[in-house]
Amino acid sequence: MSEELTTERLVVREWRLDDAAAALAIYGTEKVIRWLTPAMGQVADEAAMRVVLQAWIEAQQNMPDPRGRWAIERRADGEVVGGLGIRLLPPYKEDLELSWQLRPDAWGHGYAAEGGRALAAWAFTQEIDELFAVARPTNTRAVATAKRIGMTWVGETDKYYNLRLQVFRIRPSDLAT
């Protein structure tokens, strides 16, 4: 996605190296990262976050749409409050995961659902017909966000990451409601 997505309150855009401090407030926070392990470990400091962002930026250039990672920026103040991603779920063959991560002080404002819904709508213009989200059953915030995005619960599995996970799915027709 080379252009930005704009919603009422948010801009979904590509990550930049100067986002390192803001990204660290997300990916360097135990409250966030505990739900991402084993897919991602906690980032230790701003320098390490810059290295991670550099890898994401470089990888983005070689990923076919709709895959990638993006920053969630508040339109009101330009502050990065979270991240969104679309990537292949393990075993990395076909299931695309829509994921979201917000810094803790941005929880409860609906940013993940608003940004996730916009990203899903764009993704469905890229010749895909469904996206999945996975969450640990105890991650009630992620489960609630998946539902607010318009995703439907399809069951539990241990197929991804060798963890027992709730699986949600969204299709283009789900965005029409």
Image (cartoon, helix red, strand yellow):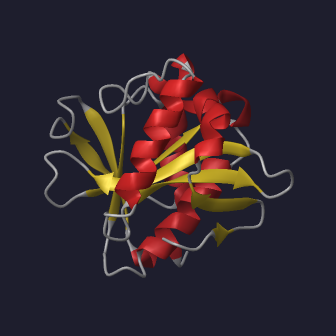
Above or below: residue 75 compared with residue 25: below
Report which quarter residue 68 is drawn in. Answer: bottom left
User: What residue is drawn where x is 32% and y is 68%?
Assistant: 130
Residue 136: where, in percent of width, then height? 36, 31
User: What residue is drawn where x is 40% and y is 30%?
Assistant: 36
Farthest residue to the right: give it. 76
Residue 30 as seen in the image, left or right of residue 36:
right
Marker count (numbered): 0
Residue 117 as seen in the image, left or right of residue 92:
right
Above or below: residue 107 compared with residue 97: above
Q: Nearer the viewer, residue 4 or 129?
A: 4
Q: Nearer the viewer, residue 133 or 26?
A: 26
Residue 10: where, in percent of width, then height? 72, 59
Above or below: residue 42 compared with residue 92: above
Q: Decide if residue 104 is in sight here.
A: yes
Residue 143: where, in percent of width, then height? 47, 41
Residue 42: where, in percent of width, then height? 45, 21
Q: Decide if residue 152 is in sight here.
A: no
Q: Nearer the viewer, residue 8 or 54?
A: 54
User: What residue is drawn where x is 30% and y is 26%?
Assistant: 38
Q: Quadrant of the C terminus?
A: bottom right
